Amino acid sequence: MKTQLLIATGDTDYAEHLSNVLSEYYSDVIDVSLCRATEDLQERLAARKYDIALLEADMIEESALQSVRLPLVLWSENEFTSEAPEGIKKIRKYRRISSMIGDVLELYAKSLKNRSSTSSKRAWITAVWSPMGGVGKTTAALAYAEKKAAEGKQALYLDLQPFSSVGAYFSGRGRSISAVFEMIEIEEGSVEMLIRSIKQQDNGSGVSYFCCPENYDDINILTPESVATLIDACAPLTEDLIVDMSCICDGRTRKVFELADRILLVTDASRTAQIKLSQFSAQHNIFQNIREKTTLVANRGAIISEPLVDDVINLPLVQSSDAIAVYKTLSGIIM
């Protein structure tokens, strides 16, 4: 269900520009209505309810806001406006719209009661894991995400590694995913709505992602139940959800395995990687539980003489120091 947003301002040019941008880039999230006069505003508020209203302060004084869940004041340092009523937060005009709408949606998410999505849509979840670091797990995850985006699907990359790789591959500067972790832990607000407000999309690949956690402990304190809440909140917002995990096989990893539709198990030709993979398959009944939905990804030209599963993807060694170029090259090969 879309968020109903009312914009009430006498600044006609700004209102039209804001509405056009929201209609072009946020049409899957927001349904926009425009109001340019106080009389029109009164009629609109009497006729229907809105989730969010962005209003100039001089309009708020005469408005009955009981039909608005979250009223917000539009303001500018360069304009004279009336003082906003006490308790109503301000949203600054004349800045990058993606930043402004991010603020608006985050405030709205925090104003909502904790509730599950009513959407029946659920992403295809692909977990990418390896018992050893350095084998190209993240490269494989991003190659797979880009392939899905190139096929015209919505692809969302979720990095659950303790030290995120997002900054090495994407240049967006948005809100940290730490805000989502905090909301999950306090069990207040709508996690799904907050995720909508902070996810970024890479212009080059079309892959959506989240900016890095603010510090190591933010992700390290997540419980398996928290991870499940996070994945459940992401799943209605995309067609393919790619989860890049730590090499540790802990409760959080097992929870992702449980929720995943497919698991990409990544290894390379090194003796250490082969030994660790063999130990994982032999010493854990976890592998037997996930075997049917697991695809082995033999990276960097690795030859696996006795693969653990029937489904194997062989990725070549790509000679490049550019991490982005490597995963883009492999996106044309990975299935």
Image (cartoon, rainbow, N blue to C red):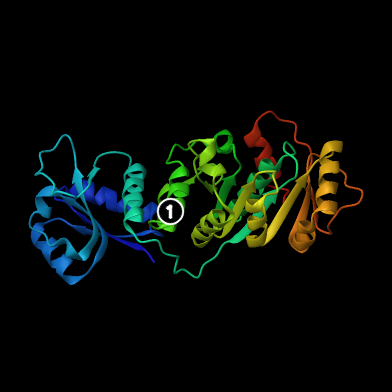
Instruction: Spot the residue most to the right.
Output: 305
User: What secondary structure is found at the residue carrying circle 1?
Assistant: helix
Foreground residue among 154 and 151: 154
Q: Position of residue 229 (x, y in %)?
A: 52, 58
Q: Residue at x 39, y 66 (%)?
A: 1
Q: Position of residue 160 (x, y in %)?
A: 59, 46
Q: Residue at x 83, y 52 (%)?
A: 283
Which amino acid type is marked by label 1?
Arg
Q: Position of residue 16 (x, y in %)?
A: 24, 51
Left or right: 332 as drawn, with respect to 108: right
**What residue sits right under mark 1 in the picture?**
196
Q: Residue at x 29, y 38 (%)?
A: 95
Left or right: 11 as drawn, with respect to 160: left
Left or right: 258 as drawn, with respect to 195: right
| In this view, 36 is above or below 141 | below
Left or right: 99 as drawn, with respect to 273: left
Image quarter in which the C terminus is found:
bottom right
Q: Position of residue 231 (x, y in %)?
A: 55, 57
Q: Residue at x 78, y 42 (%)?
A: 299
Can residue 250 be spotted in the picture? yes
Foreground residue among 97 and 125: 125
How many numbered discs?
A: 1
Instruction: Spot the residue most to the top.
Output: 321
Check disc 1: other Cα within 10 Å, few if <14, some if 14-19, many if 20+: some
Determine the image quadrant of residue 189. Answer: bottom left
Can residue 154 be spotted in the picture? no
